[in-house]
Image: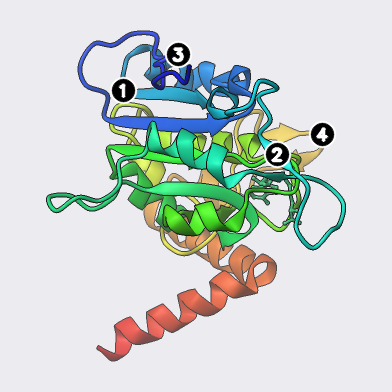
Amino acid sequence: MPQAPEALVTRAAKAEPRWTAVVLTLFPEMFPGPLGQSLAGRALDDGIWALETVDIRDYASNKHRTVDDAPFGGGAGMVMRPDVVDAALRACHRPSDTADAAEPLIYFTPRGRLLDQRRVEELAAERRVVMLCGRFEGVDQRVLDAHGAEEISIGDVVLSGGEPAALVLMDAVVRLLPGVVGREESLEEESFARGLLEYPHFTRPQTWDGRAVPEELLSGHHERIRAWRQRQSEEATRQRRPDLWARYVAAKADEESS
Ligand code: SAH
């Protein structure tokens, strides 16, 4: 019998969690995995967020609990069946009704739009996000289309399953939830927050392995430090990420002309 999604890893349900992640997977035991540690783990214990897993295999209809089949058109590998994935999605994804927009449903795939910090911020503003992890060659396209899944990639690499991608997305969201990261300012300065990569960091010892810390940082002069960091951010972005740099320059030009 298919079961309702269980709050398997919500370890303390105090108040209503600010954010709930629902992960459909063939490997529920992979969760919370690394998110049970450190900042995210503490926030999970505190009930700031909740994580529910749905075992897709529970929705297979035959006695062998088959979830995949050979691809039409031939080729290597197997494809996750639309009927099985549909049944799993129906058990946990709330589609749009007249009152509310549909809650986000994400399918992880290298064919998806690249995940970026802006999308992470938007997802952090939601109450509940449903994530579907593929295995094998992926999921039958029809069920993705039928449910209006948003296809997201975490980078131009091929993983063996969507689970690490779901962990990446959840990690990035959870640290933005109020009360998870100690000092909120530390989020504002970060890479991407202002369209630039962050400046480099240094700590004690002041000289290590014959290498000194940039003297601007030792000056105690706030404006000089700020200007140095800004220059370092711009320089790193220009050299390492011409795509971000072009967008930053265009946005600045826009700002100045308006
Ligand atoms: N045949 C696919 C790769 C399948 S990898 C292709 O060439 O596009 C198996 C599963 O891993 C996918 O269904 C997807 O859910 C996940 N996956 C692999 N790479 C990913 C990436 N870069 N981002 C997000 N999910 C990924």
Q: CA distance from mark 4 to mark 3?
A: 48 Å
Q: Tell me the amino acid under the disc marked 1.
A: Ile
Residue that numbered label 3 is attached to = 8
Q: Residue at x 82, y 34 (%)?
A: 209
Q: Residue at x 75, y 33 (%)?
A: 208
Instruction: Name the one closer to the observer, 188 or 64.
Output: 64
Closer to us: mark 2 or mark 4? Answer: 2
Q: Check disc 3 and report its element: helix, strand or loop.
A: loop
With respect to residue 102, does 255 lie above or below?
Answer: below
Q: Is residue 49 left or right of residue 206?
A: left
Q: Tell me the amino acid under the disc marked 4.
A: Asp
* Residue 192 percent location from the top left of the image: 48, 57
Q: Check disc 4 and report its element: helix, strand or loop.
A: loop
Q: Tell me the amino acid under the disc marked 2.
A: Asp
Q: Can the viewer see residue 188 in this picture?
A: no
Instruction: Specify the quadrant of the image occupied by residue 5.
Output: top left
Closer to us: mark 4 or mark 3? Answer: 3
Q: Residue at x 70, y 22 (%)?
A: 64
* Label 2 Cα neighbours within 10 Å, binned few <14 / some 14-19 / many ≥20: many
Mark 1 Cβ and ligand 1 under 8 Å apart: no
Q: CA distance from mark 3 to mark 1?
A: 15 Å
* Mark identifier at residue 209: 4
Which callout, 3 or 1, points at the residue further toward the start of the chain? 3
